[in-house]
Image (spheres, grey):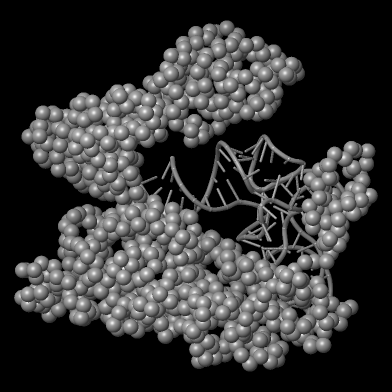
RNA sequence: GCCUUGGUGGCGGAAUUGGUAUACGCGCUAGUCUUAGGAACUAGUUCUCGUAAGGGAUUGGGAGUUCGAGUCUCCCCCAAGGCACCA
């Protein structure tokens, strides 16, 4: 062998041999595994070290699965439509495909250096007409099924990119690509009816076909934003017109004190004549129209609005008329664009009501017995009011039972002077006693009695105790003499107020609600109570729970034909057209007679024509509109003159189904062969960035479900397991970016340390989904490790005998590495490999006393379990051992149970849970034996001598704990 | 504000069901070898008291359950990511 490990030489050699032998293209095995990477957008900048992290992981899994007898499908391709290539084309007047082709070549070269198991025969490029033919085909099918429609609603328009954006493309009201303020513009658009699938997209997140991280699922749920509520109509007083409102809190309807419509609402125009202050209203409408989304949502959130003077709406539940406002805190695009306002139970309405001095009526009580306790609450207010604080002020302490809360709120509501001491009796007796004793307020002389008393207050929760205490903090004695006001039902207040002495603490969730509510009824409030509870002030619905009331009220609405239950989604239909050049043409022809007509299937693909100028027109049409040759065509239906659709598809189109095409990339007849689809779907492992959690993953799921409905695919979900890659940050902790000049280029790392070291390092950095800073020194560590493996080859000797200790460690390592790879815990798998190699090195290479040599079969096993991470080195050493066949055609070793147990173990001796001694004992030592040894041990006796041994706990193979 | 995930040495991070906290890697310290620098190798490295033997403390903070808690329960704090006037 060569004396030195030279990764450059062996990596190149093996990549070529694997490729020419078609090593990864054996699809004939019984078990299948589909490992998928999110295909990259081939940018001009090339790869940085963060890119390959996910690819390395799928490659490790792919190689591992191959060794376990799977046929593995592991493809790669290019998501090549997109703005950067187009912008480059605008600037340099070259066709975007030119830059794209060049970038793809660079990316491919960079990827090949890692030695990935990609089957390049299945390479996909979304800009290839043979590929986008099927993207267009899917659109056509959606069009046929009525899922693609034209709309003229106002849409998000980016003035800089000169294109429409979907809601998913916005970041806080800004264009996510260029950061420009998005404006609302009315434009004809193609829209996909994704909301038809909202219910399924949500429900199937919990199906067994999806095994994803909770956080990703949660993001999708959030985005879909399902809400269950009711929609009903309210008459305008003395008029025929009505407005419809949507609410999720129908149970609070008796608390409605006004109603609000969004500025866009049509009722404003309809009632123009009735609105006596229309000038003012119009001013407001204009002002809010000029507000950007940013101003409307992000800034201050100071609510504004104008009352529509002369207009009132009637609450159908109690026939009471309430004023109507226009305010931009109500969104035109969600629900009906109109709401009933219940300031007592909605934060936003509350804020608005306070600003415009509107009445606040509570109609929900926290479920704590408000009605029954009303009288008692009044009593409490009275009693507290009667305390004469001028007497012995320093000795008055007001105690509440409960566990925590805010004294300030309490003092405010009951008008207690700031310098009066307020405290708490904890609900939990031990806590209460601790606090009393610690603060020295009462020395508990008569423990039994005290316990009784305290626990009586606390556990029965019957008494709001207002007591005074004489105490002497100096010697920690004192006397508690009670002025007791036993008030039945004060439990309610105790629940509302939990006050802790001595510490400044913020209120917990429940305390918040209760405190807010109490403020509300006492008129000192600063916020609304928004939780569920029991109805009050609600006529014959009183005393119902919120949930019951919602049911009954909805039923009543339906009976009276005023409204019904309604489910709303935050998710909107997918605005699917872009006014740009570099995208798939939408396969539609507009005919004057027949309207929008789909291009016949056999005429697909509709090719992207050559243009002179790639610049977007800015008029809401794409550059394609300027090419008369292409635009003017005949109607496929009637043969008359027609014009082609000039909008193109968004970048997300091609990536919404690409995973299917890899399975059957060259099929010209069908999108995918039915049998092959059954053989390979679903994707077993999908790895990519978490930033795609709500867009790409949602779009792909939507298309997949559609393809399921039309019989193209047979699985309900495309991706069985999704794993997100944690970012690799720069050494300075920031994101890698040209701007910070902190980008690490993988080519350089590979050039210096080799692909195997790089692969190993990225897998070793930490938990796979976590963001971690790059540290080139870490790669050095991996290189050293591989050097050790390399040098161990010298220690092999066929004549040597079995070494029990090494056997045990080897089989433990096999077991751990196997389990860790299966669970994507690559970092700990590598740690374990290092432990093994360090031990082998110590045992064989460095031991001066023993002349032992390593067994060849042990070394082979090591190479096998290392091979997914460091394939080139493993293959090279495998061959140097004299094997002819590739290591990746071997079988993954199994951990032999008989080697897994140590003969001797270290048994820990604890005294009262503290480690005092460690003893080497046989693994099968009995409890009695170890007890005897432990109790006689000198170090142990230091702690146990003269003490009574209460108990001894024995945990086999672990420890013995002596309790004294 | 809401949701999700997390908080362990100087740093990245380990720790099946509650059972030896700090594995593995980086960095650091000392030594060997080198003309020197670097590399390589050897030993050490949670903190703290102590010359040492040895003791004490420690998994964001506080309390609880337990013979025993990084792990379980309650409360609080902080960080990252997502959502956010969605009625």
Query: Which image quarter: residue A531?
Result: top left
User: In the rendering, at what x and y percent does residue A44 appear?
Assistant: 39, 76
Residue at the image point whose x is 48% and y is 70% from the top: A684
Picture quarter with the C terminus of chain A: top right
- Is residue A826 something one can see in this rendering? no
Between residue A587 and residue A263, name the one nearer to us. A587
- Is residue A24 something one can see in this rendering? yes
Question: Is A508 drawn above or below residue A122 in the view shown?
Answer: above
Residue at the image point whose x is 49% and y is 21% from the top: A493
User: In the rendering, at what x and y percent does residue A351 appear?
Assistant: 33, 32
Left or right: where does residue A625 sit relative to residue A421?
A: left
Residue at the image point whose x is 14% and y is 39% from the top: A268
Between residue A324 and residue A904, name the one nearer to us. A904
Outermost residue toward the front in this view:
A559
Query: Which image quarter: residue A344?
Result: top left
Left or right: where does residue A615 sit relative to residue B10?
A: left
Between residue A355 and residue A688, name the one nearer to us. A688
Picture quarter with the N terminus of chain A: bottom right
- Counting labels gives 0
Left or right: where does residue A365 sit relative to residue A842?
A: left
User: In the rendering, at what x and y percent does residue A757 appear?
Assistant: 61, 76
Residue at the image point whose x is 26% and y is 28% from the top: A257
Question: Is A587 drawn above or below residue A405 in the view shown?
Answer: below
User: In the rendering, at what x and y percent does residue A770 appear?
Assistant: 54, 60
């Amino acid at each position: 062998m060569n004396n030195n490990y030279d990764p450059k030489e062996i990596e190149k050699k093996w990549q070529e041999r694997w490729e020419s032998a078609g090593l990864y293209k054996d699809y004939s095995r019984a078990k299948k595994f589909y490992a998928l990477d999110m295909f990259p957008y081939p940018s001009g900048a090339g790869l940085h070290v963060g890119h390959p992290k996910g690819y390395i992981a799928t490659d490790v899994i792919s190689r591992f699965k191959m060794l376990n007898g799977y046929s593995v499908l592991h493809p790669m391709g290019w998501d090549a439509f997109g703005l950067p290539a187009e912008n480059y084309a605008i600037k340099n007047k070259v066709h975007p495909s030119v830059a794209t082709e060049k970038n793809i070549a660079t990316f491919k070269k960079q990827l090949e250096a890692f030695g990935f198991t990609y089957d390049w025969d299945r390479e996909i490029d979304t800009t290839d007409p043979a590929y986008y033919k099927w993207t267009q085909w899917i659109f056509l099918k959606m069009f046929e099924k009525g899922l693609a429609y034209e709309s003229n609603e106002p849409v998000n328009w980016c003035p800089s990119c000169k294109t429409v954006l979907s809601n998913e493309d916005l970041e806080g009201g800004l264009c996510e690509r260029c950061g420009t303020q998005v404006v609302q513009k009315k434009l004809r658009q193609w829209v996909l009816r994704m909301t038809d699938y909202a219910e399924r997209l949500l429900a199937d997140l919990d199906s067994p076909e999806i095994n994803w991280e909770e956080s990703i699922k949660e993001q999708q749920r959030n985005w879909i934003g399902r809400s269950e509520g009711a929609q009903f109509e309210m008459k305008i007083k003395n008029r025929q017109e009505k407005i419809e409102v949507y609410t999720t809190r129908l149970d609070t309807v008796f608390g409605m004190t006004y109603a609000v419509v969004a500025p866009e609402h049509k009722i404003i125009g309809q009632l123009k004549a009735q609105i006596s202050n229309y000038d003012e209203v119009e001013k407001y409408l204009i002002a809010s129209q000029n507000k950007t989304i940013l101003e409307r949502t992000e800034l201050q959130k100071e609510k504004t609005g104008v009352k529509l003077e002369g207009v009132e709406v009637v609450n159908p539940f109690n026939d009471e008329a309430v004023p109507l406002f226009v305010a931009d805190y109500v969104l035109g695009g969600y629900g009906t664009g109109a709401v009933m306002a219940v300031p007592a139970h909605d934060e936003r309405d509350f804020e608005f009501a306070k600003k415009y001095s509107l009445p606040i009526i509570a109609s929900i009580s926290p479920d704590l017995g408000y009605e029954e306790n009303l009288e008692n609450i009044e009593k409490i207010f009275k009693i507290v009011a009667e305390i004469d604080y001028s007497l012995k002020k320093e000795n008055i302490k007001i105690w509440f039972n409960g566990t925590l809360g805010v004294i300030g709120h309490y003092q405010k509501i009951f008008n207690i002077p700031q310098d009066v001491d307020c405290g708490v009796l904890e609900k939990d007796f031990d806590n209460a006693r601790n606090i009393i004793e610690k603060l020295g307020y009462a020395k508990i002389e008569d423990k039994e009695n005290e316990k009784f008393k305290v626990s009586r207050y606390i556990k029965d929760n019957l008494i709001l105790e207002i007591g005074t205490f004489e105490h002497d903090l100096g010697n920690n004695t004192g006397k508690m003499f009670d002025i007791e006001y036993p008030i039945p039902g004060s439990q309610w207040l105790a629940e509302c107020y939990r006050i802790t002495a001595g510490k400044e603490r913020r209120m917990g969730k429940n305390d918040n609600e209760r405190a807010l509510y109490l403020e509300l009824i006492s008129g000192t409030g600063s916020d609304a109570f928004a939780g569920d509870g029991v109805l009050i002030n609600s006529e014959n619905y009183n005393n119902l729970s919120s949930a019951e009331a919602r049911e009954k009220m909805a039923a009543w609405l339906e009976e009276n034909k005023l409204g019904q239950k309604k489910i709303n989604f935050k998710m909107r239909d997918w605005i699917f057209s872009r006014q740009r050049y570099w995208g798939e043409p939408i396969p539609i022809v507009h005919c004057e007679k027949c309207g929008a007509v789909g291009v016949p299937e056999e005429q697909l693909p509709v090719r992207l024509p050559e243009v002179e100028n790639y610049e977007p027109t800015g008029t809401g049409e794409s550059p394609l509109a300027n090419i008369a040759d292409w635009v003017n065509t005949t109607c496929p239906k009637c043969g008359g003159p027609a014009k082609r659709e000039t909008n193109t598809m968004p970048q997300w189109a091609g990536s919404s189904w690409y995973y299917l095409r890899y399975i059957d990339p060259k099929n010209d007849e069908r999108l995918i062969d039915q049998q092959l689809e059954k053989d390979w779907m679903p994707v077993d492992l999908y790895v990519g960035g978490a930033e795609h959690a709500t867009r790409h993953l949602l779009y792909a799921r939507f298309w997949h479900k559609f393809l399921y409905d039309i019989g193209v695919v047979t699985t309900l979900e495309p991706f069985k397991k999704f794993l997100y890659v944690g970012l690799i940050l720069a050494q300075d902790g920031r994101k890698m970016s040209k701007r910070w000049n902190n980008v690490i280029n993988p080519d350089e790392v590979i050039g210096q340390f080799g692909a195997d070291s790089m692969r190993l390092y990225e897998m070793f950095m930490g938990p796979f989904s976590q963001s971690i800073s790059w540290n080139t020194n870490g790669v050095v560590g991996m290189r050293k490790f591989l050097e050790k493996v390399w040098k161990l080859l010298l220690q092999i000797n066929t004549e040597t005998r079995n070494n029990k200790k090494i056997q045990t460690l080897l089989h433990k390592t096999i077991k751990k590495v196997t389990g860790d790879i299966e669970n994507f815990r690559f970092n700990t798998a590598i740690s374990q490999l290092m432990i093994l190699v360090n031990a082998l090195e110590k045992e064989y290479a460095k031991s001066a006393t023993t002349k032992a040599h390593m067994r060849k079969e042990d070394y082979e096993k090591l190479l096998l379990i290392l091979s997914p991470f460091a394939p080139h080195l493993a293959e090279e050493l495998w061959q140097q051992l004299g094997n002819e066949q590739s290591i990746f055609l071997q079988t993954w070793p199994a951990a032999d149970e008989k080697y897994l147990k140590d003969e001797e173990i270290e048994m820990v001796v604890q005294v009262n849970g503290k480690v005092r001694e460690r003893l080497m004992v046989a693994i099968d030592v009995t409890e009695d034996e170890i007890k005897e040894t432990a109790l006689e041990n000198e170090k142990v006796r230091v702690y146990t001598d003269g003490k009574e041994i209460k108990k001894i706990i024995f945990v086999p193979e672990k420890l013995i704990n002596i309790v004294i």
